[in-house]
Amino acid sequence: MPGLPGGFPSVLNTESSWTGQDFSLDSHKSILNLSAADIKELENALETFKNSGQDGGNVTRDTFKLPVLGDTLRQVSQDVNSGRGFAVVRGLDPRKYCVEDLTLLYLGIQVYIANEQGRQDKKGNMLVHIIADNSTAQHAEHHRHSTSSITFHNEEAGDVVSWLTRSTAIAGGKCIIASGHTVYNVLANTRPDIIRTLARSDWPFAYPRFHCRPILFNHQGKVIINFGRAPLLGSAAHPRPEHLPALSARQVEALDAVEAIAQATQLEIQTQAGDMHFINNLVVLHRREGFVNGEGSHEKRHLVRMILRDSQLGWAIPDELKRDWFDAFEKDADRAWHLEPMPEGFFPLRINTN
């Protein structure tokens, strides 16, 4: 059996190499429960920022000062960017705040986790609303708007992905994550040939534009994983164009192996309204279980997603991914901050699979 690609480690002995069982009896490792004092500090910072008359896009560590909680959140940032790769900040009650204030609190907390915010599509949307929407067939089948379970994947860009849970479904909808480094270790030990397949540059991604690149990278001492099945295999909402090359049997086997190992080692997090999830998008895979909404507005799953990068703790990005990172974080283009879901013209779905 062929060995690992040159330079790839035989094992990753890192804090980011975990399984769901590592946290099942010790949830405090991954959840920061805000105290009454923390919430008071946040509300004071919120009022100070609002009194300054600035827009939400101007939330920074200087304009949203958290002299005590900020230090704790910077430790959470270390955990997300350089440690286990994920965290949950819990304790805010969304029903207590108007949508503008809740969004500012979200921005104020996350700027301490990662201080750079990215555009998520060509329209410049900074906030992406993940809600059930069956108004059209494409909406109902799109990852962002379906109620079905979806497979493990990464977002196309962003060192860190965050979600604010404005409300939860009456059943299902758990956030499910898995360590890409644990997947790597299992494959490196049992199927190094699959590591070689994942590291090849011949994976034909159809979206957001056709391009070939690896799924797995060993870049400046860090093993990085970045992929989604829909851009590679197509989906009901994103049929694969017939003129593009199809995946080989070897590539399909590799994707199935990643999915199987991720599911076997996954961590399920029962989400609560007000939760803010942060995951390292270069290490941690995520998926969603299917869900059922209720009739009331507070019984319908509504997440607000952002993609982030920290100027101090951000990783070096492989050349093959730099275009997407440039478009998200550096491109001189408009940024749109829609506090509520908008029609498709404001949120293009056709070339954005997530």
Image: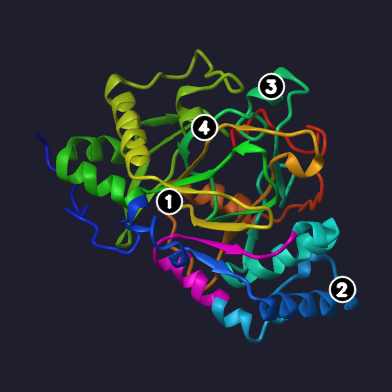
Region in magenta? 73-93
Dot 3, crowdedness within 10 Å: few (<14), some or many (≥20)?
some
Tell me which label, 3 or 4, sits earlier in the chain: 3
- Give the CA separation, mark 1 to mark 2: 35 Å
Tell me which label, 3 or 2, sits earlier in the chain: 2
In the rendered image, residue 270 lying in the magenta stretch gets the answer no
- Give the CA separation, mark 2 to mark 4: 38 Å
Task: Indicate the amino acid at tag 1.
Answer: Val
C-beta proximity under 8 Å, tags 3 and 4: no
Residue 50 is marked as 2
Q: Nearer the viewer, residue 81 or 336?
A: 81
Residue located 61% across and 73% down the image:
112
Task: Indicate the amino acid at tag 4.
Answer: Ile
Dot 2, crowdedness within 10 Å: few (<14), some or many (≥20)?
some
Task: Indicate the amino acid at tag 3.
Answer: Gln
Residue underneath mark 1: 284
Q: Secondary structure at mark 3?
A: helix
Residue 138 is marked as 3
Give residue 193's quadrant in the image: top left
Residue at the outermost bottom position: 67
